[in-house]
């Protein structure tokens, strides 16, 4: 019952004109960013963070805006998957398999509608899952001491490469690079400067927002410059057709949607999985379970519903560890963590006790955003298909300039812009080497907290390093971490080969 | 081959990082761990993973031809100039030039690129500065 009281309070917070307008704006921008190939949930949110700050929004409104973008991007990715056969973002790539054949058969409208409904079902159940599961996880997290937190951070880094990672050495490299960057600046415990090389600008440390926008948004601009595909996606006249799916189709897809929502949510909550893997396993499971006549891959509506429910549910699931533990399991939630940290809010068990307004306001806003998205994505889908026709030679300069404006708006310093360009180049090079970027971001975000927990744990135990593996809880976390690191070495190559059969370039920023 | 060079670069980076960590001056008020230990752990794992990358390289990444590399380098230079000239020339002028350049290099015709540049710049100025009240760089003309 307490949950419902909290939720009611949350709705009271979310139902102000400002918050509703922000949710609407976020849903709209998110759907566009999801639909446009080249912009996905993580770089979409990254570009908008500085905007949320410079507008002077408080914690709850900023989060409402940015998580609406996140949910919206999960909806939007399917539009270009279905109409153009190009996934609009990474999690939507499985939707291509059946969505595009449906469109070719003249059933684009039905495909868009059924995938919109599937997205709604996935997000809806995932938001309920968030409500039910997060408080339970908080109860466990309250048992954590500094040693357990250190183990938890280690777990996050060791699993972040994901089950689909083929080269764990590169994931480890990325995590250490991020942690190393976080060390720059004045040491919080003793006050000595580290790795600043006498540069005063570096005493405060690197601003992780600068790193995020550079790595995610600017590197994308460089990729486009390299490939010079400045045109729009091949816009051969698309007929959308009727936008209402026949009841029989909805009925046939309902069990699929429910099953894959559950599976996707699970994939989202678990470390190292995320939305892309959520949609992948949802599709694979449905195919194995239901594909008796071999219709999957030729335009089966269930093959559209499964990955869409799966990836939207995973998006909601990924919010659970981020809010309850302060440890994100996917790229976009890492970016959302950056937002919280910049607003001086530390997610984790204390967030639920100290800032219940933020948590429940956010959850209520997610429900509202979900209904807005359903409304936007079925009747108004024609609007977004027109946005798809904007060629990237117009879009990319805008992306670059908005990134610059956002960072300059926060700090007003040319030095930060130079650092951001540096990160952009670094991001481009690392993407070429197939080094994942998300661990770098997570490292810069969590580096100092991780070190503080380590030092606190050892100081409490008078300098005994074995305190790190002293409790059963810590040992369990280390065991999961090691398992999560070793598992991809065994199965990673196979999973990745299946997931990335179509295109490879997005691997570094997969979500 | 690329991965081997990358790995060796990583090893050098980790050595440099470790050396810089050893240079950190410890204050007399230190906790049991001190400011050096964690960076040294990072350096060790960084070096180890770089060594693995160098010893077990992935297939060669698809490097762009020299022309495209020059393209990216030129874009970087333009962006750096943009960062430096932003406070001098003001937001609208600097952004129009930078956006026009990017649009041109992404394949717009020169006149069209100029329109994209001016449109982007004025559009951002109107939305972000006039509507949302964000403070942007002021140039000699006040915008």
Image (spheres, rainbow, N blue to C red):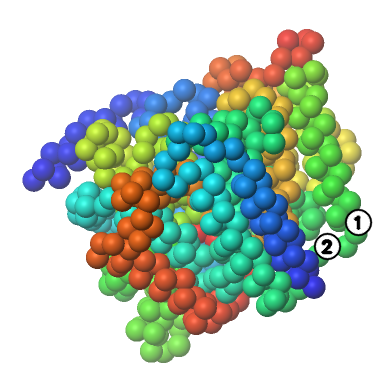
Name the mark on residue B67. Answer: 1
* Label 1, label 2: how far apart the Cα atoms are: 8 Å
Say whether residue B91 is visible. Answer: yes
**A144 horizontally vs A93: left or right:** left
Identify the residue at image location x=42%, y=41%.
B31
Number of on-image labels: 2
Q: For mark 2, name the chain.
A: B
Q: Which residue is more in the foreground, B19 or A128?
A: B19
Q: For mark 1, name the chain.
A: B
Looking at this view, name the residue that lies furthest to the right. Answer: B67
Please say if A19 is above or below A488. above
Pinpoint residue A156: horizontal percent, then vertical percent. 43, 59
Pinpoint residue A26: horizontal percent, then vertical percent. 46, 39
Identify the residue at image location x=73%, y=10%.
B142
Helix or strand or loop: what does disc 2 sit on? loop
Pinpoint residue A36: horizontal percent, then vertical percent. 60, 52
Name the mark on residue A107. Answer: none
**A152 horizontally vs B67: left or right:** left
Helix or strand or loop: what does disc 1 sit on? helix
Q: Which residue is more in the foreground, B88 or A78?
A: B88
Dots 1, 2 in contact, CB < 8 A = yes
**A226 horizontally vs A333: left or right:** right
Looking at this view, name the residue that lies furthest to the top. Answer: B141
Identify the residue at image location x=70%, y=52%.
B16
**B126 horizontally vs A489: left or right:** right
Category of crowding for the residue at label 1, using alpha-carbon neighbours closer than 10 angstroms: few (below 14), some (14–19), many (at least 20): few
Identify the residue at image location x=40%, y=31%.
A344
Q: Which residue is more in the foreground, A323 or A202?
A: A202
Name the mark on residue B64. Answer: 2
């Amino acid at each position: 019952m307490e949950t419902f009281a909290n939720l009611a309070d949350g709705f009271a917070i979310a139902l102000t004109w400002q918050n509703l307008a922000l949710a609407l704006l976020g849903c709209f921008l998110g759907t566009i960013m999801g639909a446009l190939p080249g912009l996905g949930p993580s770089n979409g949110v990254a570009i908008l963070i500085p905007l949320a700050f410079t507008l002077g929004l408080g914690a709850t409104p900023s989060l409402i805006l940015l998580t609406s973008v996140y949910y919206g991007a999960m909806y939007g990715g399917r539009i270009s998957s279905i109409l153009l056969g190009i996934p609009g973002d990474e999690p939507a790539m499985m939707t291509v398999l059946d969505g595009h054949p449906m469109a070719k058969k003249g059933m684009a409208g039905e495909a868009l509608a059924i995938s919109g409904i599937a997205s709604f079902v996935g997000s809806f159940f995932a938001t309920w899952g968030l409500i039910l599961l997060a408080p339970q996880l908080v109860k466990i997290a309250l048992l954590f001491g500094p040693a357990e937190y250190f183990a938890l951070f280690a777990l996050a880094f060791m699993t972040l490469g994901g089950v689909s990672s083929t080269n764990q050495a590169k994931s480890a490299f990325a995590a250490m690079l991020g942690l190393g960057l976080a060390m720059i600046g004045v040491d919080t415990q003793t006050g000595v400067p580290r790795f600043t090389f006498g540069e005063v600008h570096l005493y405060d440390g690197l601003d992780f927002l600068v790193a995020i926008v550079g790595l995610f948004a600017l590197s994308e601009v460089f990729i486009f410059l390299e490939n010079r595909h400045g045109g729009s996606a091949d816009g051969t006249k698309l007929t959308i057709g009727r936008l209402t799916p026949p009841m029989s189709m909805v009925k046939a897809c309902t069990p699929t949607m429910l099953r894959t929502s559950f599976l996707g949510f699970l994939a989202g909550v678990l470390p190292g999985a995320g939305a892309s893997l959520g949609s992948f396993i949802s599709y694979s499971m449905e195919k194995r379970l239901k594909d008796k006549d071999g219709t999957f891959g030729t335009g089966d509506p269930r093959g559209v519903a499964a990955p869409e429910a799966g990836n939207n549910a995973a998006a909601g699931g990924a919010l659970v560890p981020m809010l309850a533990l302060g440890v994100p399991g996917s790229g976009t939630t890492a970016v959302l963590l950056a937002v919280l940290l910049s607003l001086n809010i530390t997610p984790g068990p204390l967030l639920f006790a100290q800032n219940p307004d933020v948590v429940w306001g956010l959850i209520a806003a997610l429900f509202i955003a979900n209904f807005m998205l359903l409304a936007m994505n079925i009747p108004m889908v024609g609007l977004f298909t027109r946005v798809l026709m904007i060629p990237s030679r117009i879009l990319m300069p805008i992306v670059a300039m908005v990134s610059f404006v956002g960072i300059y708006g926060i700090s007003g310093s040319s030095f930060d812009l130079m650092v951001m360009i540096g990160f952009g180049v670094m991001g481009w090079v690392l993407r070429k080497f197939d080094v994942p970027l998300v661990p770098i971001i997570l490292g810069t975000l969590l580096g100092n907290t991780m070190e503080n927990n380590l030092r606190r744990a050892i100081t409490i135990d008078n300098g005994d390093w074995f305190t790190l593996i002293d409790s059963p809880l810590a040992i369990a976390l280390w065991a999961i971490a090691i398992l999560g690191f070793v598992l991809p070495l065994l199965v990673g190559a196979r999973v990745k080969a299946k997931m990335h059969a179509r295109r490879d370039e997005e691997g570094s920023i997969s979500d | 081959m690329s991965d081997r060079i990358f790995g060796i670069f990583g090893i050098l980076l980790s050595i440099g990082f470790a050396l810089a960590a050893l240079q950190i001056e410890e204050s007399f008020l230190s906790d049991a761990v001190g400011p050096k230990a964690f960076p040294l752990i990072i350096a060790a794992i960084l070096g180890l993973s770089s060594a693995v990358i160098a010893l077990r390289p992935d297939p060669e990444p698809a490097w762009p031809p020299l022309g495209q590399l020059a393209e990216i380098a030129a874009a970087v230079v333009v962006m750096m100039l943009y960062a430096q000239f932003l406070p001098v020339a003001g937001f609208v002028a600097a952004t129009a030039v930078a956006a026009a350049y990017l649009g041109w290099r992404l394949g717009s015709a020169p006149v069209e690129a100029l329109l994209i540049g001016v449109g982007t710049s004025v559009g951002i100025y109107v939305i972000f500065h006039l509507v949302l009240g964000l403070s942007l760089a002021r140039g000699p003309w006040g915008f």
